[in-house]
Image (cartoon, rainbow, N blue to C red):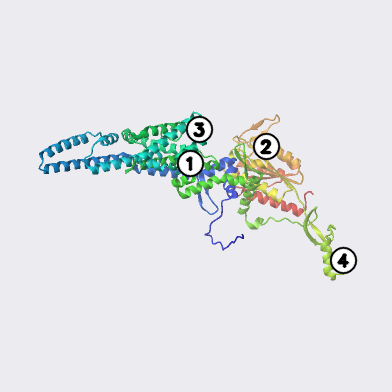
Amino acid sequence: MAHRYRYSRWDGTQTGFELGADDVLAEITDDLLYHGDLDAALRRMLQAGFADPDGERVQGLRELLERLRQRRREELERYDLGGTYEDIATELRSVMDQERAGLDQLAEEARAADDERRRQITDEVVTERRHQLDLVPPDLAGQVSSLQSYEFTSSEARERFDQLLDRLRQQVMQSYFNQMAGAMQASTPEQLERTREMLGALNQLIENRDAGSPEDGELAFGDFMARFGDLFPGNPATLDELLEQMARQMAAMGALLNSMTPAQRAQLEGLASQLLADLDLAWQVDRLAANLQAGFPGAGWEQRYSFSGLDPLSLPEGASLMGRLGDLDQLENLLRSATSPGALADVDIEAARQLVGEDGARSLERLAELGRLLEEAGLVAQREGRLELTPAGLRKIGRNALSELFSKLAKDRLGGHPMEREGVGVERAHATKPYEVGDPFDLNIERTLRNALQRTGGGTPVSLTPADFEVERSENLTRSSTVLMIDLSLSMPMRDNFLAAKKVAMALHALISSQFPRDYLGIVGFSEVARELKPQQLPEVSWDFVYGTNIHHALLLSRRMLARQSGTKQIIMITDGEPTAHVMADGEVFFNYPPVRQTVDATLTEVVRATREGIRINTFMLDATSYLRDFVEQLTKLNRGRAFFTTPETLGDYVLVDFIENKRAMSGRGGGSR
């Protein structure tokens, strides 16, 4: 079936730019280049959040954790757990007051009747009943027990008490199981008996499994669900799924009791035991709690909270609140321990939506996608439990750095960076030109014959004249070999110069590999000593926690690398310090600050050797101290290279302009090798 599409002019209000892998990589590029750790860069992005292509704020874990803490504070400062049992106590007192009113009415009616015997018997009964009511214990469980055996005079009071018992029994069961089983809210003898049977069967199923009984397994669980599945509307697929849900809710009830004062806790525990004493329910619930604590010790059985509010809570409301607080704790722990986007795959988004809102849940979904987006785009790959850049990812970061630097340059300085393409060479340019004296006679037959036919109007034989000749254009090939020397000494990050230097290295590599593929680029990092760096190492290169700027060793390595290359040769040196270290004849490194004559002389000796080998040295200074200025002045006098005093903000401009203008000069001279 054909799809129909409708297009309209974008007015700036429409959204729909999906977050892509390129956006993610661009977001972490600076962090990755600065610290050299892809996993750490993603972790920091998770923590801080970011803005997507639509400009929508994707909240980071820090914001989401603060939202969870604020939600917890609001709950704790709103409610008073004392109301959980005060409401029950108030209702029981009301029932007894109603019974006393009934006794008063009964005595009044007897006194009004002209029957002494009736009055006497009534007075005895009323006195006895009042005495029984006066002896009712103050605790909730004692009150319920006493009133259960009490013979009510008031039928209205008896009815209210029975209804209260039914409601409390439902609330206790609901508090333990949070409406997981619909029939657990029922209070008829038949329904309570079925609930007891279900709890007994579940306990037996757990104990059989723990004992390794052959009755264990999904078959036994299937039998259980066949008998009692209607009690569990959530339709759990496995025994573990069912038990985990029940453990969390029973732990929430435990947290409710733990958060009360000892007196409040004793009141409710006694009441629950009294209410569930019928039909052996209390024993089965305690048995299930013990089994679940053994199977799920980390469910939060010992959790407690400090409430300071005034709003009272009913028993089921209190248990439900504890469930929410438990969910808050669980999500907070998961977010706090998340070290990679993949760890967020375990978040229950629907539950998170209730805790942090729609926008927070959406942020969690998008944060969880980060690693997957990068992997599916082929920009990163898992290696030994860590994410690492692929070659495609390396190229992408280089292009990002190059694009960022070029975007800052004035258009009239570099423009499209054209090269003069016409001239003698060995590479066809897939274009032709009229023949001129001196051109190689690389005749393009098709264009030549077409010119002749257009001139003569057709016919055979075809008559050719020199004006008809067209020859192949060829590129004027130039090749340069460059070594980029990057200062990795500790002063670079301390003076905020390191990130700019790494971006220049990435951008220069991207520029040469994409625009000038015949050119050579070598990279040398130097601090106390120097070492060759491969392009694939660049994103993870970090500064060295050592003192020393060994330009001497870096120049020595650079000369050796360029000795194996052809074409115009140059060294681009980026540094914020003067030479303070050199390699001595015995191979040991000598360091001293401020620089001594011995180190400067050794370094300048390498400059002289590079000059003799036709290597030009261009220096980009990020902190022009007096020592560095003096050294660079001596270097440029010996080498005839150029020196630039720049800043981290303009470093890339200077380096790329210098490199491209040098390429233009080479092209204009027609120099280089084939």
Left-right relation of 320 to 557: left
Judging depth in this view, the residue of 483 and 365 nearest the camera is: 365
168 up-or-down from 462: above or below: above
Toward the bottom, the furthest residue is 457
User: Mark 4 to mark 1: distance in Å?
Assistant: 91 Å
User: Mark 3 to mark 2: distance in Å?
Assistant: 64 Å
User: Mark 3 to mark 1: distance in Å?
Assistant: 17 Å
Percent across and percent down for residue 509 are: 67, 46
**Of the image marks 1 and 2, the number of the one nearer the N terminus:** 1
Amino acid type assigned to the residue bearing label 3 in the image:
Asp
* Label 2 sits on residue: 531
The residue mark sitting in front, 1 or 2, is: 1
How many residues crowd around disc 3 within 10 Å: few (fewer than 14), some, or many (20 or more)? some
Amino acid type assigned to the residue bearing label 2 in the image:
Arg
The image quadrant that residue 634 belongs to is: top right
Amino acid type assigned to the residue bearing label 4 in the image:
Thr
**Of the image marks 3 and 2, the number of the one nearer the N terminus:** 3
* Label 4 sits on residue: 465
**Of the image marks 4 and 2, the number of the one nearer the N terminus:** 4
Residue 295 visible here: no
Residue contact at pointers 4 and 2, CB within 8 angstroms = no
User: Mark 4 to mark 2: distance in Å?
Assistant: 62 Å
Percent across and percent down for residue 226 are: 47, 40
Percent across and percent down for residue 203 are: 44, 33
The residue mark sitting in front, 3 or 1, is: 3
Judging depth in this view, the residue of 533 and 646 nearest the camera is: 533
**Which disc, if any, is residue 236?**
1
Percent across and percent down for residue 78 are: 35, 44
Secondary structure beneath disc 4?
Answer: loop
